[in-house]
Image (cartoon, rainbow, N blue to C red):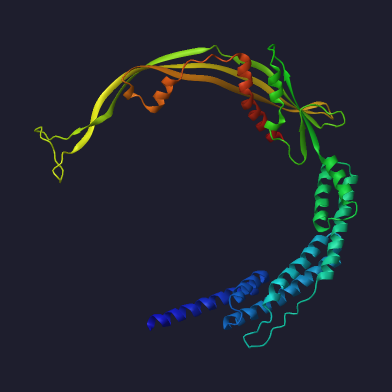
Amino acid sequence: MRNIILLCVFLCFGACTTLKSTQKEINSGNYKTAMLDAISKIKKDKNSDKAKSYATLLHTAFRKYKSEINRDIAFLENDSKEIHAEKIYEAYREIKLYQNKIRPLLPLESTENKVLNFHLEDYSDAILKAKTELTDQLFSQALDLIEEKNRYSYREAYHLLKKVERLQPDYSQLKEMQDIAYTNGVSYVLLSTANKTDLILPQKFHQEMLNLDTYHLDDFWTIYHNHRHNQIDYDREVKVEFHRFNFSPERLSEREIPLEREIVDGWRYQKDRRGRYILDGNGDKMKEDNIVLVNGLLLKTVQSKEVQVQANVRFIDLYKNEQIASQELESLFVFENVYAQFQGNAKVLTSDEQLLIRRGFVNFPSNERMLIDAIQDIQMKVKTILKKQS
């Protein structure tokens, strides 16, 4: 009985605390938070006494919220409809949103069992009017930006026109102005390579270096080309100039590795110190792993060859025909082949060592092949430099 009383006291205290927190939100002017709290509680059981308490709080919060937002709208309209067009539109949409949350709960009764009148209004005409004024204002601002004929003003105009599209997709001349803003807002960049060494580079090297599919550089406002289009005015050129290719000699290093390991080689019957067999609980002889020491000699061979690539990535402003930035690039590609020969008991070998002895000598790659293999690392470094400069 005592536990039941304590539970009832706890539940009542919890309910009072929640009601007080909602009332506190109202007193603090956090009307939207108070409304959302009350609505969520009423939804659980709108006919309960607790729901009536929340309904009373919801009525108070909504009345104060509505009065506040109407004052804000009136102030914004008196101050400047053009400047505050978006705020006015969003304010009307917001009050409609909260009305739509309340409407399915009606009718609601107060703690005095009286039907509460929320005085819900139809804001459709006001929203449509504010929406029209906002779209006209955004479109007008976009046209002013387009008239500035500046790349960044074109981009800003495009973003404003996308807002217009979300509000009114069929707005007059919208698509035409979007095309103008985007076409003039895009930057075109030419990617090229230059060989400043005496080495004759394979054609495939240039082709792969300029393969734009491997860079993934294009973004919404920047388009890269690997060859010049006569009808396009390029903003910048990114030129990768190769200054040095250092090839190492073909190296072959050998190392003898003595191997000695204990391994399990079958089993045997266990014996005690006197040489007698050890029996289990059933009287059967017990078994144990037979550990033996095995050894061998591993002759490990490493083939290696390197190419070091040194280059500069130059950024050129094609309107001013001058370099605006330059960054050094260095890449190292290493060819390596490891294999081994073995003498001794093969049981001493690990799985990795077994793999080595199955491999063998391979022909060293040519300098041309080394350059082609080095391209991936060079491209990654060029991409990193481009991302930092963008």
Quadrant location, the N terminus: bottom left
Of 93 and 88, nearer the camera is 93
Note whether residue 74 is visible. Answer: no
x and y, in percent, of residue 49 in the image = 58, 83
Q: Residue at x 77, y 40 (%)?
A: 221
Q: Residue at x 69, y 25 (%)?
A: 209
Vertical comparison of 66 with 177: above or below: below
Left or right: 263 as drawn, with respect to 243: left
Left or right: 227 as drawn, with respect to 376: right
x and y, in percent, of residue 264 in the image = 27, 30
Q: Residue at x 77, y 63 (%)?
A: 90
Note whether residue 139 is visible. Answer: yes
Query: Looking at the rendering, which quadrant does residue 182 occupy?
Result: top right
Of 361 and 82, nearer the camera is 361
Q: Residue at x 87, y 56 (%)?
A: 171
x and y, in percent, of residue 331 in the image = 61, 23
Vertical comparison of 36 with 355: above or below: below
Vertical comparison of 211 with 77: above or below: above
Quadrant location, the C terminus: top right
x and y, in percent, of residue 85 in the image = 83, 61
